[in-house]
Amino acid sequence: MADFPSKVTTETSSPHSQSSQQGGNSLQGLAANFTTRMDMSFIRSIPAILMIVEIVLGLLQWALIAGAPYTLLPAYGWVMFVAVTLWILTTILFFMILFDGRQKLTFIPWPLAVMVYFAGATVLYLTAFLANAASVQPFYFTVFYGQMAAAAFFGAVVTVAYWASAFFSYLAWKGDGGNAATNTVPT
């Protein structure tokens, strides 16, 4: 017991590493702590393909509406809000899943959160699609009729893609066990 203090060291870092981090090379230490890992199997999955379809066609839909005088009809304001907001959120979610953000944010029940997101997005996009389709009138804006009709078509396709994503995320949620109690109870 007398030799115990001689075996214990209280030094947490070498003096050389302290001087290098205090100097101008502090970004190297930051880069060592930040590691990214791409989930390449996710890109080849059906949910990823659906998310890419939602991102690309959602962008196309709101770009078509933004190119027309959408401020003249109040319904297009709702369509733009839903399309742009869900486009941004879906893009963020896609990159979070792609770069394995689920492993870094373990306190979020990911299967349930993704299912709720896609179910809500489906309902919102359905209302936006219906508002878009109901507002397309051939004699009101004859120059932009084709543009608004194409936006309504892409809105319908994106709505179906969000529904399919909600369905597959429901299957993933149910397949994952959804309920924490079922995973902890011995059988």
Image (cartoon, rainbow, N blue to C red):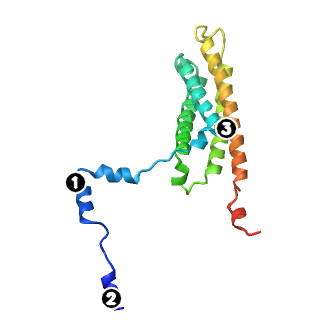
Kind of residue indicated by mark 2: Asp
Mark 1 surroundings within 10 Å by alpha-carbon count, few (fewer than 14), some (14 through 19), many (20 or more): few
Residue extending furthest toward the bottom: 2
Compare residues 125 and 55 and report the one nearer the observer. 55
Q: Quadrant of the C terminus?
A: bottom right
Query: Considering the numbered disc 1 on the image, is that residue within a helix, a strand or a loop?
Result: loop
Q: Residue at x 69, y 66 (%)?
A: 184
Examine the rendered structure and indicate whether residue 56 appears above or below residue 172: above
Query: Quick check: can you spot residue 126?
Result: no
Compare residues 75 and 167 and report the one nearer the observer. 167
C-alpha span from label 1 to label 3: 48 Å
Which-is-in-front pick, marks 2 and 1?
Answer: 2
Whether residue 6 sits left or right of residue 97 in the image: it is left
Q: Residue at x 24, y 62 (%)?
A: 16
Kind of residue indicated by mark 3: Ile
Mark 3 surroundings within 10 Å by alpha-carbon count, few (fewer than 14), some (14 through 19), many (20 or more): few
Query: Picture quarter containing residue 2?
Result: bottom left
Mark 2 surroundings within 10 Å by alpha-carbon count, few (fewer than 14), some (14 through 19), many (20 or more): few
Query: Quick check: can you spot residue 180?
Result: yes
C-alpha span from label 2 to label 1: 38 Å
Kind of residue indicated by mark 1: Gly
Q: Residue at x 61, y 8 (%)?
A: 142
Instruction: Please state the horizontal and vertical placement of residue 130, each as a whole percent of the image.
Output: 68, 26
Q: Which residue is mark 1?
A: 23
Q: Which residue is mark 2?
A: 3
Task: Point out the tag, 3 or 2, that comes first from the N-terminus.
Answer: 2
Instruction: Please state the horizontal and vertical placement of residue 29, each as a whole percent of the image.
Output: 33, 54
Examine the rendered structure and indicate whether residue 91 appears above or below residue 104: above
Q: Which residue is mark 3?
A: 46
Which-is-in-front pick, marks 3 and 2?
Answer: 2
Q: Residue at x 59, y 23 (%)?
A: 61
